[in-house]
Image: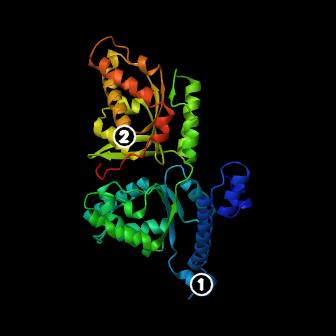
Amino acid sequence: MSLRDVETHPSVARRYAHMVETGAVSRDEQQEKVAVALDGLISRIAERRLARKSSALGWLFAKGRRNREPVTGLYLYGGVGRGKTMLMDLFFELVPVRGKRRVHFNAFMADVHDRIAAHRAALKNGETRETDPIPPVAAALASEAWVLCFDEFSVTDIADAMILSRLFSALFAEGVVLVATSNVAPDDLYRDGLNRGLFEPFIDVLKRHAKIMHLDAGTDYRLEKLSRLPVYLTPLGPEADRTMDEAWEAAAGGREGHEETLTVKGRSVAVPKAAGRAARFDFADLCSKPLGARDYLAIAQRFDTVFIDHVPAMDLSRRNEAKRFILLVDTLYDSRTRVFLSAEAAPEALYRAASGTEKFEFDRTASRLVEMQSREWALNAPEPEVSAAR
């Protein structure tokens, strides 16, 4: 969305109506309700912005008024493809403050852990006497941005779960306003996670500081687009790359792809491009590196749609890559993950060795790749369960 669009349509509801009129989106009554709620939040934040001004006049007008009370944010949850991120991004562009930040929740928590580590190092070196890193980290984050927008709010890491209550209590005390999208209701965050009892106070903190809205079941617009696109592209070349790019745009739902790192038993697994619940890899990223079952399972748990570019035909000279590819496909198949793949050859011609264990195992892989191309697979693939352990 351009600056001109924002100026022409100065509210989320108006901008959304314009998108409906131009055919960019289909009208959805639930989305309209969320747009109205986001506009109400923008108004409250604008009032708070006046109260935060350092000028004497600003404080004079703000003194004693209710706009100095905490601003209740918004936690928007619902199924994939319901337009949650689109609506939040409209809000982010239109909310009239400079101190705002829009970030994937996992990336935000990685930043938090880095800051905590830096504080502990400073304490060890005698550079600070503050033994608790949470208050100064929260204060620093709030000074950089007091409107925080999180995409894909989820909790799967015990290290995150153990600090969220204290971290966000401190952030809210600093006046931070939260807007977040998630696939799950607050009460289902970190469900069945290790030591969940220590996490549960965060749910109460969240509910006190954010209005909870459910963008309930409706048309999965992302899935509608994806179901019309081929999921197995061969042969390799510009046409396959173009179609993969088109499918990626649909899966990303307008999100900006970014690098992400998954932590598996203390090791890092790089995700070259992630957008919400979709991830994109090159074959070499997944099968030319020493990855194993736990790594592939972590990918399947984090993402419901996986893109794999440039799968080559393999023979005995690429036996290790073939073994990993077999394991990768098995994992994605068992997890019911939606897969888009570009390959040098059709599934039955991808492994070209005349003998060896991999030849027989690859027959199963080829069969699964064929099954995963069906429209029924794409439409019925549920979201993978998220484990508490990484």
Task: Tell me the amino acid under the disc marked 2.
Answer: Ser
Residue 227 percent location from the top left of the image: 55, 37
Between residue 142 and residue 271, name the one nearer to us: 271
Q: Which mark is residue 156?
A: none
The mark nearer the N terminus, 1 or 2, is: 1
Residue corresponding to mark 2: 335
Q: Quadrant of residue 3?
A: bottom right
Which circle, 1 or 2, is nearer the viewer?
A: 2
Determine whether, in the image, residue 37 is placed left or right of residue 187.
Answer: right
Taking the spot 48% from the left edge, 30% from the top edge, the residue there is 373
Q: Is residue 289 visible?
A: yes
Q: How is the image coloured?
A: rainbow
Task: Tell me the amino acid under the disc marked 1.
Answer: Ala
Residue 223 percent location from the top left of the image: 54, 43
Between residue 268 and residue 204, name the one nearer to us: 204
Q: Determine the CA span between mark 1 and mark 2.
A: 54 Å
Residue 90 percent location from the top left of the image: 61, 58
Residue corresponding to mark 1: 62
Q: Which residue in the rendered view is the most extreme toward the top?
A: 354
Between residue 323 and residue 51, name the one nearer to us: 323
Taking the spot 32% from the left edge, 31% from the top edge, the residue there is 327
